[in-house]
Each structure stands twice: as C-alpha cells, then as structure tokens.
Image (spheres, rainbow, N blue to C red):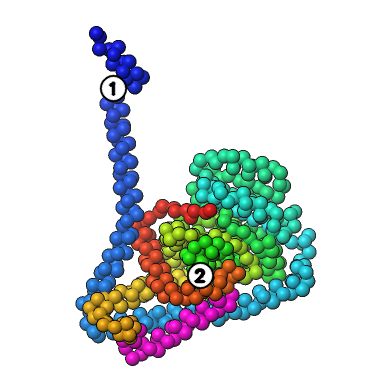
Amino acid sequence: MPAGPLISSWYGSSISKPRSLKERLGFRAGAFQHATSSVGAFVDEWTPFLLVASYFVFSICCYMFCTDMLIEMFWFIYLTTNFYIAGSTVLEAFMCLTPVKDSEKAVRKIQDKDWVFPTPDDELLILDLLIVAYLPNEKDIIMDRIHYALDEIMYPSHKIRINLVYNTPNPIEPLETELQELAARKSHFRCIKVQDSTSKADNLNYFLSLNTGSDITCIFDADHYPHPYGPRWAVERFIQDKKIDICQGRCVIFNSKVSWLSAMISVEFDKIYAVSHPGRAALWGFGLFTGSNGYWRTSLLQELKMDKSILTEDIDSTLRALTQGAKIVHDLNVVSYELSPTSLSAMWKQRLRWAQGWTQVSMRHMPLCFKKAPEGVHRNFTTRFGLFSLLLIRELSYYLVTQYFCLVLSIIFTQFPKSPSALARFIFFPYPVSEWFFIISISCLIATLIITNRVKSEFASRRMMIIFSIIYTPYLVFNATMGLYGHARQVVRYSKWNATKRT
C-alpha cells in the first residue's frame, strides 16, 4: 500500500513543508534575543541586591579587624550624626504644632459659619482636578473614584472639571466605553486616553499641553478619595495669598485595618504628612509637592511639566519650581484618603522606586544648596541649609544608620555578651558619653511620636501608635537599607517601572 495516503490520514492537516533556512535562522535569532533580554533583566534585578549584600558583609568584616581605638572613634561619629538626625526630626515635629493649631482654628471658624467659606462661589478660581491612572492597574477602582469625585466634592460644578487622564497598553472593555459614555453625560467630566504613554509623566505632560483655561490644577493618583472640602480649602489659600504657587495637602491612609503593614504605613503617613512636611516648611521655609493631593497654579505647571526620566518626577518638579522662587505651602485641611500597599512585596517595590527617584533628584538638584539664588528669587541661608539637609544629609543617613548597625553586629560576632543585660549595656552604653547620646536620642524619638499621636488620623489607633513606636528603630534600619538599594539601582542604571497594585 502506498505510504503517502496513510501518513496523510494519520497526521491530518499537521503536515507542513519543512521551514526554509531563513525561517529557521530567524526563529533561532528571536529565541537568542529573548534569552539575552531575560538574562539582562535577571542581572538588572539581582545586581543591586548583590551590591547591597556585599556592602554589609564587607563593612562587618572591616569592623571585626579594627583596633579598639578605631571602633571607639567610629562609634562616636555614628552616634553624633544620628543624634543630629534625631534632633532635626524632633525640631521639625515641634515646628509643626503652629500649623496644626492654625488648621484646627480655621476648621472651627468655618464650622461656626455653617461651612460657608469666605470667597463667594462665583469668585472662585477655575479648577482642573486630574485623576491620573494606569488603567490595567486601577481598572477595579477607577469608576468608583470618578463617581465619588463627581458626586461628593463640594465645589461649584461650573468652576471645576474632573479629568481622567489615563494610559493602557491594551484596550480594556467594556470599561473604556463606559468611561466615554459617562463623559458624554456629565458636562464637567472629561476622559482622556493618552496614546503611546508609558508613564504618569507622559499622561500629565499631554494634559498640560492642552489649553483648558483653568487657574489651578490639582493632581491625584487614582486610588485617592479627596475630602469633599479639600479642593475648596486649597483654592481659598490661593485666593488669600496671591504669592502661593503650590499647595500640598495631607494624605491619609484609610485601609489601615487591612493588615499590620498597612497599619504601620498609616502611622508613618501621619508622621510624614502631618508632622514632617509642615514642620519642615515652617523650619526651613519651603514645602514639597509629593505627587498627589497637590495644587498648582496652572501656568507654572504648564511651564515646568514633568520629567519622565526621573522616577520621582513630583519631587523633581518641586525643586525646579523652587529654583524659580516658587512659594510652596502645606495645608493640613486639604485632606485626601489613599490606599497603602498591603503586602511587603508591594511596599518593597514602591519604596525602592521612591528611593532611586530621590537619589536621582538629589544628584540633579544638589547645587541648589550652595548656589546663591538668581536676582529676583528669594532663597536665604536657612532655606539652602534645609535643602542641604534634605538632599545630602538624608542620603548620607542611609550609610550612617547602616554603618552603626554593622559596627554593632561586628562586635557582637567577636565579643558576644553572655547575658541580655550585658547585651543591652554593650549596644547602648559601651562608652561613658553613650548614655547621654542614647537618652537624648530616645527623648527626641518619644517627643516626635507623642506629637504624631496628637495629630494622628481617625484611621490610626493608639494601639497602632504603640506598635509603630516599638518597631521604629528596626524600621529605620530597614528604610536605610532600601535607600542603599536605591543607590545601587542608580549605579546599574535600573529603569524598570514597577507599578503599585490597587485593589
């Protein structure tokens, strides 16, 4: 029997002509390119880890071979510098008390007037409220946030426009159609899909290229719920003080009860947004736009735009604005509620992105600390020293904290204490003056946490505050390690964007 029909019936339509040499070479080239890119991605991911691990191992080994005199010298250097950091932190905390009292007084005044603000509705500034989204990451929450903004924000509808500015690599239906239909029904809602965008900066820059006619532009990440009166508080600040260029509000974590990690981040955000930021503004004379719940004069934002090459494009835009003499304030009544990462891996990706972005910003804008301001721009010595502390000392603190940690570990390895009391004496009081450094630093820490407890949000409980206080010292080491990791990523030119998952 002829073989051909049998083979054909057995294999059916799977029989095909042998591939040509050109096709086979193309397939192999594609496979080789894919393998090369996979190896490159693996190297990019793990090289920073190896650099940081080598840093710790090398540091500990060096201290193990140091003489007693060198150990004592390093001990005092690290205690002194860490004392400076603790002192600066508590000083900012005390300085925040005046803005806190002012904000509480302003709320009582408006409450007594049945929430009638000083400026009549018809005289309010025109406001563009931007919700910036990477749609695949926020598809489950975006409709909820838009309906909230349309229905709950207490601002005259003829003076505000809610703008969704988003990008997506692939169509997401029926969501995108529903968004366009909503825009057709709501006259003060616009839905803008930015083609070929790969970042938040791309989305913002496209919107800023449009002539919308607004006076103020505020920016929100897609997970935020602005307080209903938040935009009104911010615009009133601009009206009261014509010199204000940027007003940064307070961000509050509202999913604090989801996990222990979100609870700790909730307390941390209270410390950052209700204590550190307003305290720094009062102490050093400048504020920061932190990426969300920030209000800009539209003309300035359109002039500066965002630099997509910087991972923390928000801080970069802030410092470029400061270079021009912009006035940046923090308002504790301009509140917005946001989600925190609920897993350690999500937090790790987010904070590493921030750490590398801060490294980029510090390298770019360090000259601000030393250069005199150009004519017409007010930047005195106090502001320059504040920038020096923010851009240089903060980056160096990652090494100071981790070096102290390595020093302690090295001595534990070589002279391990034989009892818990001996271990405590060794860590905190090995030299006569150590007691004073320790007592003063702990006092600064306790004072900072007491003030944080005074201004904590309704989502942070006292129990959360106690736990945060207990783990605060290990957290500082963890945070410093993430800072080192950010430096290592910058050294290897790591450029992958890891978005934070929103649910």
**x then y, percent, for residue 231:** 67, 62
Kind of residue sitting beneath label 2: Glu
Residue 444 among magenta residues:
yes
Mark 2 secondary-structure assignment = helix
> Where is mark 2, residue-wise?
268
Image mark for residue 18: 1
Q: Position of residue 412 (x, y in %)?
A: 27, 78
At 65% from the left and 62% from the top, the residue drawn is 227
- Single out the mark in the foreground, 1 or 2: 2
Q: Is residue 150 left or right of residue 483?
A: right
x%, y% of residue 51? Answer: 30, 62
- Residue closest to the eye, 247 or 167: 167
Left or right, 233 with respect to 285, comes to right
Label 1 SS: loop
Residue at the (29%, 67%) spot, across then down: 55
Type of the residue with mark 1: Pro
Query: What span is colored magenta in the figure?
Result: 428-455
